[in-house]
Image (cartoon, rainbow, N blue to C red):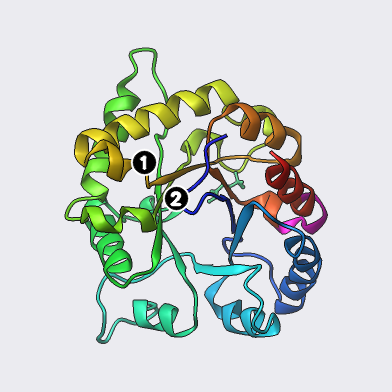
Amino acid sequence: MAKDSQNKKIVVANWKMSPETIDEAFEILKKVKETAKTLKNTKLVICPPSLYANELKESLGKSKKILFGAQNVFYEEKGAHTGEISIDMIKNLGMGYVIVGHSERRILGEDDNIVSKKINLVLNSKLNAILCIGEKERSEEGDFLLFISEQIKNSLHGVEKKYLKNLIIAYEPIWAIGKTAEDAMDSRGVHQMHLFIKKVLKDLFDEKSSEKVAIIYGGSVELENTEELIENGNINGFLIGHESLNADKFCKILKIVDKS
Ligand code: 13P
């Protein structure tokens, strides 16, 4: 299956607003760490709640087997912005990835204009941006394809070609998030969306540059559908929510992806 620009698959764990205590977070990390050591073809990025990030990261020492990411960033670099997290804070903690435009943030009012400011900030700061896109629902007429292409174009407004190697697009149809493997998109649908997103990128930039963008799938990726999606979905990896908090299952997912 397709791999990212560094020729590795990528699995991003989005812990969202969980777990409730840092002790639980350490428990998950302890188990995942053992599997991470064995990975040969897979990059693993964990995006914990930002309050936990520093301690978790420090606990791993210099090991690069688990990379860390932020779940969000503010679009202004400095200033009085209560509750926000700046790009320099993320960078100074040594976190190399930032999720931008997750549907759970877009629902709170984050539009494509804000998303593009954040994407540009992340990429211009030489960090890796994970841009989330996805439609709320589908109709027979296929309007969602226009929605997706507009979302990509608007979110990437102002992005320079040279930064595309640091861009990951996470296709997460909203209707498939937070459910079960049965409700997720099937591998055929994922494959089609991969091709469509690549085409939009090609039209927006050029063929060579768009090849550098890794495309991953998110939305009820569970142990049950991992193998089918990675073998037949033609994707570079996954963005995983709830199943990434179940350390045992998540470790099995990592092994399946690594073997594919
Ligand atoms: P689930 O894996 O819980 O469906 O969440 C997907 C997601 O939103 C990851 O960002």
Amino acid marked by disc 1: Glu
Q: Does the residue labelled 1 lie within 8 Å of ligand 1?
A: no
Q: Cβ–Cβ below 8 Å for labels 2 and 1?
A: yes
Q: Where is residue 100 in the image (x, y as percent from the top left)?
A: 39, 58
> Going by the picture, which residue comes out furthest to the left?
158
Q: Please give the name of the residue rendered at 75% of the width and 68% of the height, measured from the top-left corner.
A: 33
Q: Position of residue 58 (x, y in %)?
A: 64, 85
Marks 2/1: CA–CA distance = 8 Å
Compared to 194, does 240 lie above or below? below
The answer to which of marks 2 and 1 sits earlier in the sequence is 2
Q: Please give the name of the residue rendered at 34% of the width and 70% of the height, measured from the top-left corner.
A: 126
Whether residue 70 is in magenta: the answer is: no
Q: Give the secondary structure at mark 1.
A: loop
Amino acid marked by disc 2: Ser
Which residue is under mark 2?
Answer: 5
Q: Position of residue 256 (x, y in %)?
A: 74, 42
Q: How crowded is mark 1: few (under 14 residues within 10 Å), some or many (20 or more)?
A: some
Q: Where is residue 131 in the image (x, y as percent from the top left)?
A: 39, 52
Q: How many labels does the image show?
A: 2
Q: Please give the name of the residue rendered at 64% of the width and 82% of the height, measured from the top-left corner.
A: 62
Q: Is the magenta stretch mostly helix, strand or loop?
A: helix
Residue 142 quadrant = top left
Compared to 219, does 43 lie above or below? below
Q: Please give the name of the residue rendered at 57% of the width and 71% of the height, measured from the top-left corner.
A: 49
Q: How crowded is mark 2: few (under 14 residues within 10 Å), some or many (20 or more)?
A: some
Q: Please state which of residues 88 and 161 is positioned toward the viewer in this rendering.
A: 161
Q: Please state which of residues 218 and 231 is positioned toward the viewer in this rendering.
A: 231
Which residue is under mark 1?
Answer: 211
Side of 154 where 236 appears, left or right = right
Q: Give the range drawn in magenta.
A: 245-249
